[in-house]
Image (cartoon, coloured by chain):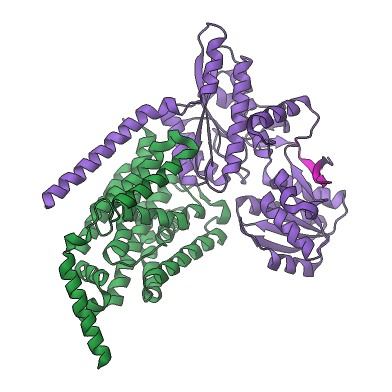
Chain colours: A green, B purple
Amino acid sequence: MISAYYLQIIILVGINIIMASSLNLVVGYTGQLSIGHAAFMSLGAYVSAIVTLQTGLPFIVSLLLGAAVAGLFGILIGIPTLRLKGDYLAIATLGFGEIIRIIFLNLKITGGAVGLRGIPKETTLLWVIGVTLLSLFVLQRIINSRVGRALIAIREDETAAESMGINTTYYKTLAFGVGAFFAGLGGGLFAHYFRYIHPNVFGFMRSIEQLCMVVLGGLGNMWGAIIGATALTAIPELLRAGAEYRLLVYGAILVLMMRARPQGLLGESIGQTGGRSLKRRKTLFTKIKLFRRNK
Amino acid sequence: MKKYRLALVIMVALSMILMLAAGCGTSQPASEPEGAGDEASEGTSEETVDVKVGTVGPLTGGAATYGESVRNAVQIALEEANENKEIPGVNLVLVSEDSEGDWSKAANAFSKLIDQDGVNVIVGAVLSSETAAGGPIVMEGKVPTISPSSTATDLTVGNPYLFRNCLSDEVQASQLAEYAIAELGFKRFAILYTNNDYGVALKDAFEATAKEKAEVVAVEAFMDGDEHFRPQLTSIQQKNPDAIFIAGYYTEAGKIAQQAAEQGISAQLLGADGFYSPVLVEIGEQAVEGAIFTAGFFSADPNPVVQSFVTRYTELFGEEPDMFAAQAYDATRIVIEAMKKYGTDRESIREGLAQTKDFPGITGLTSIDEEGDTIKDVLILKVENGTFQRLR
């Protein structure tokens, strides 16, 4: 019989795998730097918890409702912000994350600063394993489909992708929406496991932690997201013996990792994707761009 | 190529599982402090049994000072009990876990203490959100838990394993409002509260009591960690209140006092136990002079028990104990008394905690009611010449 402590860590690992792999779709495959992923998690957590508490609907319904609302917000936020690039998008998503947190902190229905207590315990190990596998399966199918190729094309070169007839805004918003949907699922599982939610764990630090999982595991690699989520959930718990110093060690591990393998544990280095052909393609398109501008 | 990568993934996954398995084997003895174990063994040859007492609180992050105070005080209480052999044949061992101030990590800490370390009782958690997240876990694990500082409303209701030793926010805020109206004769109040569970509970209780016999002319909110309070202070100033009740912690309160003074606000400053720290005067300087606030602990109390704790704490940790430390010390003393009277297993401790009546602690006479909540006197202190004086 597995102890409740290990069970809890395994459940957290599962939830974090959902969070990291869904963020990977946005950051790793589509190349859009989002640091507001925890906001979608909190939307899923609060919506599903409130639905369960107020209506008593079955867990599966509230879980899906939470995820749907998160996905909807992903699309709504995605439409205006995804026109921004790189750093600007990062700042916009960060701002969005803080807005959501502050709103939850001030609403009556969310319990405000007291938090939401007495959520029934619905999340079991079986639920987490089921939802995690399902999420990974769906995400993997998306990545290996025509949509996935379009997303990767956008990451590699947005202008080139657009010139090939890919509706970049549509696909970026789609990736953002799908990522948010699965983050909402993770949030719903989270709320119904702890039976208590308070906005302060869905802050900017949680978003950064999830981004770390993706980067550490390797951007644009599903196995990477899984390994990154597992490692960054388990390491702080393994280091508990170190008391106050454990976060120091945790930080040092991150720094050393990034020094030794900047592409992440399983990330593809430039060479693997065929750096030369990529470079050649890029110069070709730069020429086309210049040609257009001169005309 | 693909097969090779799959093999790599499996290897990494396997090594992680091994790490996890190895981690649990070695972490247990390492997390026990050395000091507590040695002293018992050198005295007599009789056999002693280790009984583990856990703490959960932030040891890292923004709220780390509160968590450290709690852990330090629990350590002192346990060491004293071991030195004086208060419970025959029992050696109390401290296992303290960090929550990073994050309630989901506090939940991990609670689970670890219960399942991995097998503690018989937990003193914690520190923040209300941490205790709220830990509540269902200790109830399921049937481990009695006493929080020294989580003041949120109704936290212990419906949970027979959860107790607390601290002033509830309602009690101190309503007693302060009554005192300010009856003894100080104030008629118009403004409230400036920090928008977290603590601030909101204080604000609600103060507002409700004050409205019965006086007027509340302004209610403004701020956030933990804010630096500038001019907008709130300006709108309060326009209402011209007799007194401003600052429902928040000393760091922000000191800054608010400074900025209010600069803005020429002369209203009396009122506060709750979040004011009780020397840091209040360090930050607020002249501006906090004359501020009146409620407290659960007063370190200049001539009571010898208080003085011996203050001396020992200052010697060991190089700073005066704050309210968190004092309440944690009392909470641990209550646990030790329960062990002496009822036994050291989990159920006996729970029974003992529930039966606590008129325990003479350093934070005053303490009883625990049927819901696990604390009943105790509220002290009222005033800042005079940069030090605290007791008014009531």
User: In the figure, is residue B343 to the left or right of B171?
Assistant: left
At 56% from the left and 18% from the top, the residue drawn is B343
- Vertical placement of residue A142 versus A214, above or below: below
Q: In this view, does A62 lie above or below B360?
A: below
Helix, strand or loop: magenta stretch: strand
* Residue B185 shown left or right of residue B343 in the figure: right
A10 horizontally vs B214: left or right: left
Q: In this view, does A279 lie above or below B294?
A: below
Farthest residue, direction bottom: A295
Question: Where, quadrant-wise, is the N terminus of chain A in this rendering?
Answer: top left
| Residue B100 within the segment the image draws in magenta | no
> Residue B244, image x and y in percent?
77, 58
Asked whether residue A165 is in view, the answer is: no
Whether residue A162 can be seen here: yes
Estimate the x, y position of residue B45 in percent, counting from the top left: 52, 6
Q: Residue at x 58, y 38 (%)?
A: B68
Residue at image coords 46%, 58% = A204
Q: Where is residue A289 in the image (x, y as percent from the top left)?
A: 25, 84
Given residues B181 and B222, the one toward you in this image is B222
Residue stretch in magenta: B377-388
